[in-house]
Image: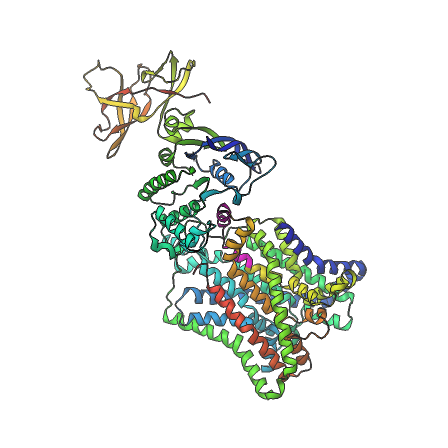
Amino acid sequence: MIGLSVLVSLLALLPIAYVIGVSLQTGWSTVVALVFRPRVGELLVNTVLLVLLTIPLCVALGVTLAWLTERTNLPGRRWWSLLATAPLAVPAFVHSYAWVSLVPPIHGLFAGVLVSVIAYFPFLYLPVAATLRRLDPAIEDVAESMGLKPWKVFFRVVLPQLRLAICGGALLVGLHLLAEYGLYAMIRFDTFTTAIFDQFKSTFNGAAAHMLASVLALCCLAMLTAESAARGSARYARVGSGSAREQRVVYLKPVSTLLSLTLQIVTCALALGVPLITLGKWLIAGGVEVWDMAELLPALEQTLLLGIAGAALTTCAAIPIAWLSIRYPGRMQRVLESCNYITSSLPGIIVALALVTVTIHYARPIYQTTFTVLLAYLLMFLPRALVSLRAGIAQAPVELENMARSLGRSPARALWLITLRLAAPGAAAGAALVFLAITNELTATLLLAPNGTRTLATGFWALTSEIDYAAAAPYALLMVVLSLPLTGLLYHQSKKTAGR
Amino acid sequence: MNTLELNALYKSYGAHCALDNVSLSVPSGSRTVIVGPSGSGKTTLLRMIAGFEFPDSGHLSLNGQTLVDGTHEVPAHQRLIGYVPQDGALFPHMTVAANIGFGLATKGPEKQQRVAELMDSVALDAKMAARWPHELSGGQQQRVALARALAQQPRLMLLDEPFSALDTGLRAAMRKMVARLLEDAGVTTILVTHDQSEALSFADQLAVMRHGRLVQSGHPLDLYRYPEDEQTALFLGDAVVMPARIEAGWAHCDLGRIPVNNHRNNNSAQIMLRPEQLQLASILPSDPEASGCRAVVTDRDFSGNTCTLTVELQPLTRNEQSGRSLLVRSSGMYAPPAGSSVQVSTIGHAHVLSEM
């Protein structure tokens, strides 16, 4: 296990090594000249503001919606829960495509925060809702018996137990904010990633872009440190005898019900209504001509193949690291995990170019093969699989694994039969997240895929770049449709707690 | 013949020494109880026997097969040792039947048959087979855990405080049921507990642990009557410990002259008596000639069938301010109120504690 996780982490270090290597080649004086200039300060302010505004909003929205759908008698809470997961099916750049075509003047920080919250809050909603469902109600009963009012019980007992889920989700959102290109390019909001992208477009392998990437990597390191400090080393598996009872339900007053329903409706209108209305508008305007099957079908097939293979590979690779981080948390483990987070927070183009350089120089046979594309997906999306898998494994106490071993199962079998079975909802959620990410992935696919590869995302991007919004609509619709059943699966899996 | 042999086991976690030179022999078919306060290392020892932890040094063998020594370690899944933890640790994603059948190699009707037998043996209703662990009470969860551990016909059964989560009435009943079941199955058993009454009633062999050391082992009756030191004496029950001068099989102490069981040539030593070895009789204040030791009752704790009295011995010499205070267990029939004058006499031998 340790060997495997070190291997995966070393692989993840490739792009970092690439960035550092290029920086060293550039020379110190050039580095200073490229990093300490007003443009970098401007980008830093933009990026930091985006992160500081978006993450708290996502946490507040995600936790509120999760609490409403999991712990109250809100009418139709099953449906609201499904709808809170659904925005994941819409790629981030399709969200901003929808907003730009609905409100053309929209741009800048406000637009960036708005679209980011809408596109990424499910990353918080899902783990928080799953954790809320599995908390031991006895702990809340005890707190209440000590005279705490219900809202105090929530803030002093429930919220602290959600820490792992909130930290994991917030980190995921933060990493997306740092790495996303399409969303911000479309609404003309400059972050490090869009700037790096522009640099690459003008000078394919320029030093300026590498220096910007180094600053971005530092930002990611700061975020990781913050998350790690907030997460702590507490034990999150349920301690105590027997199995937990069912959760209690809070009965909302009519006024609260009305307010809650309004919140749900507004969220849905912004996160689902806007993209669907825009897509519908373009599809009607475009008519039958935009459905070019000879182009669309191969793109769909490519996307499916890459998505399934990538999700399977990434989830398997995440197992050793997730298992170690729960069973033997320590500094070494943090370092291993951090390797993966840092890499995945780098824009896809950095990962892609690192792989291009490395494969050209050291692994010529796999240059421009599907294997290299999958490797890039693995490096970029491992944290998605990791966060869900880790939360899942934390639900399976080590005692159960020991029991299986004392009943004659080898450690590997015990891991498979007990821990991974209990972590299956988490693993499936992680795999689905990776699949979603791959269907929406743009840059690495463009750079690494064998000639002639055209996925739905690259097709969509090519058409929107030509401002052919109508022709791009079928690709967007297919991406959404493809992601929908998976989002449903994600929803279903997170509903199903072990053995129920 | 001995089933399990532990020889000079050491284990430390950083600076903390969890096990310090622990050696123990567990005879075939016996019920051995390891008892000690929490943090004494008893659970570590049990987990080491199960194969979840490994000693820093030492030797461990079962039925002549070496499980752990300096060069190799048999992993948990090859040991065929049953384990029932404190909370049962049932697999939450499996039904009762699947939990019990987990360790069975057979399949199909044969397996169902065996699961049904096992459920019957732990007195679980056959209707329970399709239930989920969270639908069971604490006692039922423990029965399932026991049946699951018995399924693979273990060479040794380890029980880690399996009754501590149950309520008192159920605990005694479960203890009896488990003892009988394991005896019928002929399985050598090791139970770990911090509850001394549970330890005394369950054990053929009792081993007392403290600070990672195994301080004394033997038959529970012997340990209760003849503990090595004061701490062990007090851990296994109430005790009256006082200094005495030993001479030719007699102890001279505040209670007068008491025969001792072990002839140590110590001039002065600590002796121990269990409260039930002391007897009280009423005396009239006007009768100065009463023999034995006189005392005054200072506290009475009446609990139905027994009554625990605290008495203060009257000073033998006038210049002492007050005498020694003793705990005496009397039957509920005799419960003199505080302030009564009583006469204290002893039954049986006093036990001389070794000097620590």
Name which residue lies at 18% across and 17% down: B286
Give left or right: position of B353 versus A12.
left
Q: Foreground residue, B163 or A300?
A: A300
In the image, residue B12 above or below residue A437: above
| Of B355 and B95, the residue lying toward us | B95
Q: Is residue A392 magenta?
A: yes
Task: Tell me: residue B148, above or below residue A274.
Answer: above
Residue A60 x %, y %: 51, 65
State yes or no: residue B320 in magenta.
no
Identity of the residue drawn at 60% across and 81% down: A474
Relative side of A59 to B352, left or right:
right
Lateral position of residue A312 relative to residue B180, left or right: right
Q: Main secondary structure of the magenta part?
A: helix
Which residues make up the magenta segment? A389-407
How many numbered marks have been drawn onto this rendered protein structure? 0
Between A270 and B348, the one nearer to me in the picture? B348
Percent across and percent down for residue B255 are 31, 18
